[in-house]
Amino acid sequence: MTGRMSSSTRAAANRAIFRAFKLRGLSVKADAVAALVSVLTHEEDVDGALDAILNAIKGLVERGELRSTLVDRATIETVVRQLTKDEDDLNQEAIAIWDAFSMPKMTYDHRSKSFSFTFDKERPFNPDPGSRARMFRERYALVRQRVLRHELFVRPIMGHDRNYLKLVTVDSLLGTHGEKNLLGCITQVEEGRYYLEDLTGYFDGLASLLKNEAPTLCAKATFLFLPGPHDPGAGAVLPRGPLPSTLTRSLASTLNRAHFVSNPCRLRLFTQEVVLFREDVMKKMLRHSILQGCKDHEGQAEEPLVRCLVQSLLDQAHLCPLPLKARPVAWEYDNALRLYPLPDLLVLADHSMNSSMEYAGCQVVSPGCFPVDDSFAAYYPATRTVEASMLPH
């Protein structure tokens, strides 16, 4: 195929192109051949132009930029466009601009130990709850790979004797002693208490504890997990969706009957209706209260703070009767927070409270904060009574 190509030689040109691709270990679609013939028709040196195009395609395959050896029309058009750029085109491409919403996303792959770019066509501005967890996982992965590349954390090669620091994971600390080096995210689950978490020890530790210490519960009990105000999830709007599946896989595989539900959530316990709500309501209500203290129904005796809170919630028939700027609520799902008619049992999982009382025929219990003092509450449906409990020390 030497010299300018005419229309009379297209059939022969097609056969020559198929052979040329086959010699390079490539296959080519018919529409790609037609596009290539159209390009070569306008070339003085047809063989030289075809070689340049084949070399460019082969380079894309070798660099992993082209995943298949079957070449289509789009690949031909891309390669020809790159090869036919003039000086003006190159000058215009010297500056490339991406705004925040079209910028490619760079992520680190632990298995291949390399970075990759993903070009998502559209990412929602209000994504699912798992996006928040993925965001922190990706941040952690970036920092971790940078740390591991530092000379202090690189294992010395054989024949070079020097000390180095070895990073271990949170879950590897179980049953070990001595000084360890960890890298994780510091979280404040509650005021004054800080925790270090990595990709192995958020819920994995709880799954291991239950599996080793309470196998009967794992097999027969029903567990409900509500997301709290400090748990990963999408935003701080009530009601909140379930915990992201990326964090609950170990628990889901350990427990036979595990339900990862919204906050709040409702359940029927035999003939009784139960409302579960995980929120530090007391602190927020005190911060935004206008009057200090409250009175009983006759307006005389001042009531304890817990009764003030219960009275405020149940009388207003709402789990969080605060201004929206203090605690945002999804307008269309406000009904999920309403308490009319009143349930038989309302569980307010407020870490600052550990009490139970009855008000207007509704049993209200706050079991306290288990991680702080090992306290919890047991409810007996038959007698509708609550028993404050605590693990022995």
Image: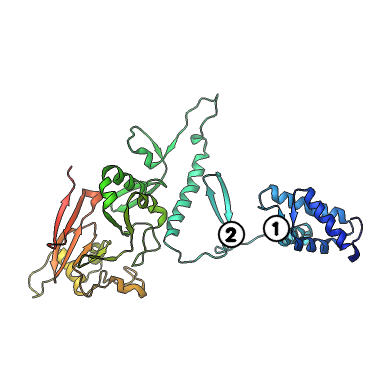
Q: Residue 190, position in %: x, y? A: 29, 53
Q: Residue 17, position in %: x, y? A: 82, 56
Numbered disc 1: secondary structure: loop
In which quadrant of the rendered image does the C terminus lie?
A: top left
Within 10 Å of disc 1 (Cα), the crowding (few <14, some 14-19, many 20+) is few
Task: Say which residue appears at 31% left-offset and 59% top-offset.
Answer: 226
Residue 373 circle label: none
194 sits to left or right of 301: right
What residue is pinned by disc 1? Answer: 94
Q: CA distance from mark 2 to mark 1?
A: 21 Å
Residue type, numbered disc 2: Phe
350 sits to left or right of 334: left
Q: Is residue 253 visible?
A: yes
Q: Nearer the viewer, residue 385 or 55?
A: 385
In which quadrant of the rendered image does the N terminus lie?
A: bottom right
Within 10 Å of disc 2 (Cα), the crowding (few <14, some 14-19, many 20+) is few
What residue is pinned by disc 2? Answer: 119
Numbered disc 2: secondary structure: loop
Between disc 2 and disc 1, whose residue precedes?
A: 1
Residue 233: name its quadrant.
bottom left
Residues marked 2 and 1 touching at CB (< 8 Å): no
Q: Nearer the viewer, residue 265 or 282?
A: 265
Residue type, numbered disc 1: Ala
Q: Nearer the viewer, residue 293 or 159?
A: 159
Task: Say which residue appears at 25% left-offset and 63% top-offset.
Answer: 276
384 sits to left or right of 256: left
**Up-down relation of residue 317 to residue 36 (above or below):** below
Residue 95: name its quadrant.
bottom right
Q: Residue 322, position in %: x, y? A: 28, 71
Q: Residue 36, position in %: x, y? A: 80, 61
